[in-house]
Image: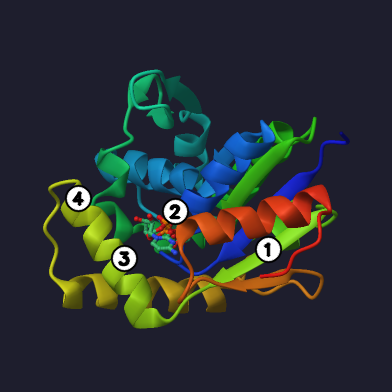
Amino acid sequence: MRKIIIAIDGYSACGKSSTAKRVAAALNYGYVDTGAMYRAVTLYFMEHYIDLTNPKSVSKALGEISITFHHNDSTGQNETYLNGLNVEERIREMEISQRVSEVAAIKAVREAMVKQQQKMGKSKGVVMDGRDIGSVVFPNAELKIFMNADFDVRAERRQKELFDKDNLVDLDEVKENLRKRDKIDTTRAESPLIRPVDSVEVDTTHMFLEEQVDHIVQLATGEKVNK
Ligand code: CDP
Ligand code: CDP
């Protein structure tokens, strides 16, 4: 079957990456978590005290960063590596969530990430999730999904996800972080989160994960969708 690009964009914690991973597995496609890339850049910038207002420092630091994904056979998941080190757990911490949108709003950072993402999807057969995949990275993607869910549901899902990883975070803190990131992500000058006109909206508020996955797989394979 002809391989396509599936772009999944949307707000934080509405189910993009959980869905994208499963859709990729069902179709035997690759999966790219672009949020992990911005998180890894943020970690590097924080560890090296990069001055975000200094374009020279930012550009130099970007040249020092290598982000790769490797499959972990025991968990069955792809994990994020920064300059050869596994940072998968570290980049999900609140400290990174609190800084990532500020870093992701920098033009040079976006240009560097978009270039890599376009390379990763060159041969198609990929599911990529983020904020600008259908609008900037792959404006010609064959299937674009715009995912959303009610704010409180998103916050509860993210808190539970963190709790399951022994990361106890107050619900109010999660809400505050989502609110702040939604605002920066939708209002920044460089490729803000928008809903592409040719995207299919999927509201996961009242859905089970499996339903989202089936729905998108059916759209991708051209099967009739009755849900
Ligand atoms: O998992 P969650 O949805 O909370 O966030 P993420 O997908 O890991 O993305 C973290 C942050 O990276 C977002 O809040 C955006 O600021 C930024 N991002 C972006 O600007 N463009 C993308 N394609 C992906 C993420
Ligand atoms: O990638 P994004 O930030 O949009 O969300 P996610 O990290 O994939 O999903 C956040 C949490 O919501 C995960 O723990 C999912 O298992 C859970 N969830 C979901 O994705 N879809 C549902 N219908 C219900 C829960």
Q: Position of residue 206 (x, y in %)?
A: 46, 76
Viewer can see residue 108:
yes
Q: Is residue 102 left or right of residue 216?
A: left
Q: Amino acid at mark 4?
A: Asp
Q: Position of residue 26 (x, y in %)?
A: 62, 38
Indicate which disc, 1 or 4, sits on the residue closer to the N terminus.
1
Find out if the beta carbon at label 3 lies less than 8 Å from the nearest ligand 2 atom: yes
Q: Which mark is residue 145?
A: 1
Residue at x-position 55% and y-position 79%: 187
For residue 197, which quarter of the picture?
bottom right
Q: Looking at the image, is mark 3 or mark 2 nearer the viewer?
A: 3
Indicate which disc, 1 or 3, sits on the residue closer to the N terminus.
1
Which structural element holds mark 1? Answer: strand
- Residue at which label 2 appears: 54
Q: Is residue 113 left or right of residue 73?
A: right
Callout 4 touching callout 3 (CB < 8 Å): no
Residue at x-position 35% and y-position 44%: 45
Which structural element holds mark 4? Answer: helix
Report the quarter where the C terminus lies: bottom right
- Residue at which label 3 appears: 157
Q: Looking at the image, is mark 4 or mark 2 nearer the viewer?
A: 4
- Residue at which label 4 appears: 164
Residue at x-position 40% and y-position 71%: 181
Q: Amino acid at mark 2?
A: Asn
Q: Residues within 10 Å of mark 3 (few under 14, many from 20)?
A: some
How far apart are the alpha carbons under marks 3 and 2? 36 Å
Which structural element holds mark 2? Answer: loop
How far apart are the alpha carbons under marks 1 and 4? 27 Å
How far apart are the alpha carbons under marks 4 and 2? 38 Å
Q: Amino acid at mark 3?
A: Arg
